[in-house]
Image (cartoon, grey):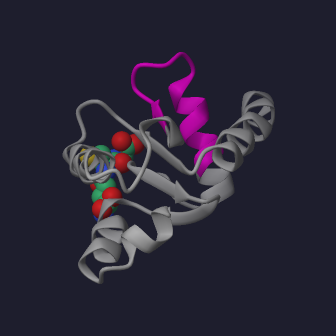
Amino acid sequence: MVAINKIIPQLKQLINNNKVFIAHKSYCPYCHSTLSLIGSKIEQQILKKEDVYYLELDTIEDGSDWQDALLEISGQRTVPNVYINAKHIGGNSDLQALESKGKLDELLK
Ligand SMILES: N[C@@H](CCC(=O)N[C@@H](CS)C(=O)NCC(=O)O)C(=O)O
């Protein structure tokens, strides 16, 4: 719990200071879909590369503590875990649903 209490303020700062925040894992297929969709928005110049923060939980030190902290603040344990403009979006299916409804580009502006 001590570790999580230290991580939560850092996590909130990353979420608040970046237009898009994505916690993901290198081997996760849902994460790959999310990264691919976000990558396409960068290619289309809807989003700037520097406006996206990627937190790769399986390759950073204390990744499981960061995942616990994400659960604490978002109520979601799975990855990807996506925030846009500090609003919790959810996982890959939630992000893809926004895209299908034509709502994602507006959120990324
Ligand atoms: N419905 C979720 C599925 C995400 C999911 O199941 N992710 C797996 C990894 S591929 C996960 O987070 N498993 C638990 C863990 O890695 O701790 C979505 O669309 O994002």
Residue that appears at 61% across and 59% down: 85
Residue 22 as seen in the image, left or right of residue 38: right
Residue 73 as seen in the image, left or right of residue 94: right
Residue 51 as seen in the image, left or right of residue 78: right
- Residue at the limit of the structure toward the bottom, as seen here: 101
Residue that appears at 72% across and 45% down: 12
Q: Is residue 101 above or below residue 41?
A: below
- Residue at the limit of the structure toward the top, as seen here: 61
Counting the numbered discs, the total is 0
x, y percentage for residue 97? 30, 76
Q: Is residue 15 above or below residue 7?
A: below
Residue 63 is a magenta residue? yes
Residue that appears at 44% across and 44% down: 48
x, y percentage for residue 106? 45, 73
Q: Which residues are magenta?
A: 53-70
Check the picture and name the quadrant holding the N terminus.
top right
x, y percentage for residue 38? 32, 50
x, y percentage for residue 26? 29, 30
Q: Is residue 105 above or below residue 25?
A: below
Work out whether residue 27 or residue 101 is closer to the camera in this orientation and state it.
101
Residue that appears at 46% across and 42% down: 23
Work out whether residue 38 or residue 58 is closer to the camera in this orientation and state it.
38
